Image (cartoon, rainbow, N blue to C red):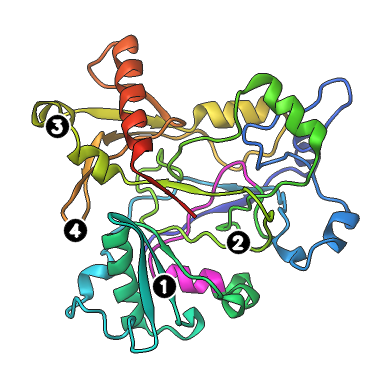
Amino acid sequence: MSTTTTTLINKNAAKSAVSETEKDPVLSYDINIPYVSLSNETSEATPYPPYLPAWDPIWFDPLPPFEFSDPALRVKDKTKPNLVTPNVKVSPIQPGLGSIVEGIDLCNLTNTGKDELALLIAERKVVAFPNQSAFLDAGPAFQQEFMKYFGKPNYQPVSGTVRGFPGFHIIHRNGNKEEIARFLQHKSTTTLWHQDVSYEIQPPGYVMLGLLQGPEVGGDTVFAATDTAYKRLSPKLQVFLDDLVATHSSANMINHTRLAKGLVRKDPVATAHPLVRVHPVTGEKCLFINGEFITRIHGLKEGETKTIMEFLLSISSWATTSR
């Protein structure tokens, strides 16, 4: 059993860490992570005030390595009878990526059903559950306990969280057009291909994304099937990539946040991961890549790393689905 140490940061330092000045406006690292506290007016404008981003000054030490067994490996009946009951409908979004599950109440899912859900996620990569208002209204304590069944919570270093539940990563736009315009002065798009905290020694195996409020048009989240991308490569290129290792680092994100006087809860982490990984449940090979955290590929020159990464990200973006 491993533990995570939390330490309160000095209050005066924390205040200065989240402050902004008119002379030096903050440019967010991610447009969905504004480094500002929210006003009472903002809290009153949403039916979900507990989920507005909180910036509690808490410090997290690195999570030590731990033993993990994927719950999908416990499933004996691959038809998933405890998940896919007669009233449940599972529909594919794309042939090789994504499914919609209707007619199920996540609040009442048994442990056996959760194991089967893990298997479905392993098979389909992304699973969407519409009409889950009861689950969304159940609150962060219930939702955190639900997700703990699938693994240990990860505490992100720079993002706003739910107060008292730092395992939540809040994606929030406050409608500040000036901030968005300033962001786009430096970047061409607000879209960024990434994998959640891939720089960790043990990145998350499961991530739950819940939509509380969103725009009537736009706001899509796009997922890429990197197993499909790998399968489309030539055998010779597959063999070449199979032996490569890449360094994933959070240093750029951490350093940017500190320069922007944002709140940082962790020191930078850098970890070497294989460029091609084997899924522990399906045995499929997939590209373990992203455009945010990979800093180098071991044994290759800088230009070679850049060229290979651009190519792999390009073919991965072809195997996508939006939801």
Q: Position of residue 310 (x, y in %)?
A: 36, 23
Q: Is residue 34 left or right of residue 111?
A: right
Task: Read off the magenta span.
Answer: 143-159
Element type where label 2 sits in the image: loop
Residue 154 located within the stretch drawn in magenta:
yes
Q: Nearer the viewer, residue 292 or 219?
A: 219
Which quadrant is home to the N terminus?
Answer: bottom left
Q: Position of residue 241 (x, y in %)?
A: 18, 29
- Contact (CB < 8 A) between labels 4 and 1? no
The amino acid type of the residue labelled 1 equals: Val
Is 79 drawn above or below residue 259 in the view shown?
below
**Disc 1 packing (10 Å; few <14; some 14–19; many ≥20):** some
Element type where label 3 sits in the image: helix
First reached walking from the N terminus: tag 2 or tag 3: 2
Q: Position of residue 189 (x, y in %)?
A: 60, 29
Q: Measure the C-alpha gap from mark 4 to mark 1.
A: 20 Å
First reached walking from the N terminus: tag 1 or tag 3: 1
Q: Measure the C-alpha gap from mark 2 to mark 3.
A: 37 Å
Q: Measure the C-alpha gap from mark 4 to mark 3.
A: 18 Å
Q: Name the disc covering residue 282, or none.
A: 4
Q: Which residue is mark 1?
A: 101
Element type where label 4 sits in the image: loop
**Residue at image coords 36%, 69%:** 91
Q: Which residue is mark 3?
A: 238
The amino acid type of the residue labelled 2 equals: Leu
Q: Name the disc covering residue 211, or none.
A: 2
**Residue at image coords 47%, 59%:** 153
